[in-house]
Image (cartoon, rainbow, N blue to C red):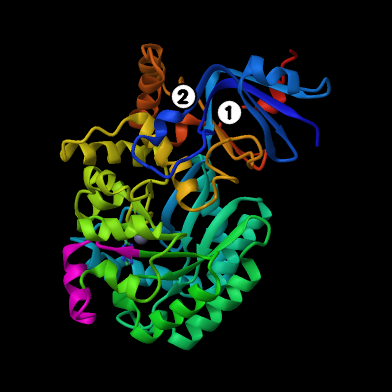
Amino acid sequence: MAQTVYRARLLVFDAPFDGIYPGAEQRASFNEDGALLVEHGRVVASGAYDAVAPRITAQASVISLRDKLIVPGFIDTHLHFAQTEIIASPAPSLLPWLQTWTFPAERRFEDAAYAREVADFFLDQLLAAGTTSAAVYCSVHPQSVHALFEASHARNLRLIAGKVLMDRNCPPFLRDTAQSGYDDSLALMTRWHGTGRQLYALTPRFAPTSTQAQLDACRTLAAAHPDVFIQSHVAENTDEIAWVAQLFPGHRSYLDVYEHYGLLRRRAIYGHCIHLDDVDRARMAACGALASHCPTSNLFLGSGLFDFEAADATNMPVALGSDVGAGTSFSMLQTMNEAHKIARLRGYHLSALRMFWLATAAAAHALELAGHIGTLAAGSEADFIVLDPAATTLLARRTAQADSLEALLFAFALLGDDRAVAHTYAAGRLVHSRATPPELAVQLR
Ligand code: GUN
Ligand code: ZN
């Protein structure tokens, strides 16, 4: 494959990361006349066009997108493939929502053909939203995991996913056992972790739906496979927290249950993290676990307001998640919009640059994937999106007044959604286009 150079406004997060999350977004590099040089699905060079130009060979295709903005593809660190069809289903709060909508919906994934059909739709939604990587919960059925990974592998996306583990406090039709959950997880991990760009996550749904035996089995698998991911939910809802205290007496906190079972570590992602205390946040930071803040879900279910100030004070790694189907949008731009407002309700200003960092490089760093995705640094995989500042008449009017990078990004975050994503590229290949694919409009230099 020959070189392709994308000439556009360009935002990259290629500075070395020192492990301090608050303020890290400031080391972004932005070029009004930028170039992203791609070869064999990887970024060869990125930065100012003039600086990249000497690397461009005579045979390279030049795609001119001068009025657009290229940023790293979004990373959605928490959502549920098996809840795609129940997005926007109301309930008073988390636990009734699970009973009323979620468990019946997830049951349908015992049918592999249905799972395959939804997997294609789900990936189309992600790519249309500009999300090129995600950490995904499948259902309890192994066939749902095969369906998603097969579809993702066929499109060469970098995806993290896993089979939900659940051996109590759920309907019998969704229940595994400590042994079957262990066996299925091991088989799926062996089949998929590291196959192409696919990565496996051990996925105990949340502490209330696993017995101690199941969490013990998880600990064994996690210890034997330190490079595998872990994902679960924590401290989302006050009823849930009270329930965990009853089911697991003697623990300092809900998070402590996961730590006790060896599940608080690097490459672990905990959804929500709303009602943590500072000791919990410090443990998350010390163990290198990632908090996935899911604002549209937290507002939809009335779960609570994530505390950015407290997260910053402890250097807890934070990234963003859509949490579809409790979340109400696949769009990470819409997710930023709601994150900004939640922060505002707590008197905290979440800048647009920080939100773009959270949706890209922050996630990549926290998941030890920064060499691959989220930054557009030279050598990384060419997962990127082309944002159109004139995607809607309102965006066009607002961005015409934007006199800084922050103002431009803020307009995208507050007014944007999938309409703002003109093109999505994964490993250098165009995988979604709203408009005429730019390859058909190649301009000569
Ligand atoms: N806690 C346990 N399961 C779920 C789920 O599916 N969605 C959300 N938002 N929280 C959960
Ligand atoms: Zn969730």
**Is residue 243 within the magenta segment?**
yes
Where is residue 202 shown, x and y percent of the image? 48, 70
In the displayed structure image, the side of residue 352 where residue 370 appears, left or right: right
Q: For the N terminus, give its image quadrant.
A: top right
Whole-angstrom CA distance, mark 2 to mark 1, is 10 Å
Looking at the image, in which quadrant does ligand 1 appear?
bottom left
Q: Is residue 339 above or below residue 423?
A: below
Where is residue 428 shown, x and y percent of the image? 67, 38
Which residue lies at the image location 17% right of the left edge and 68% below the top edge?
239
Q: For label 1, count other residues whose C-alpha is less than 10 Å away and answer few (under 14), some (14-19) or many (20+).
A: few
Res 67 seen here: yes
Which residue lies at the image location 48% right of the left edge and 80% below the top edge?
220
Q: For the C terminus, give its image quadrant.
A: top right
Q: Amino acid at mark 2?
A: Ala
Secondary-structure class at tag 2: loop
Magenta range:
233-251
Front-most of residues 210 and 348: 348
Among the 4 quarters of the image, the one containing residue 353: top left
Q: Is residue 384 above or below residue 183?
A: above
In the displayed structure image, the side of residue 249 where residue 290 appears, left or right: right
Q: Amino acid at mark 1?
A: Ala
Q: Which residue, given by chain and number where applicable, does mark 2 sit on?
A: 391
Among the 4 quarters of the image, the one containing residue 355: top left
Where is residue 92 shown, x and y percent of the image? 18, 60
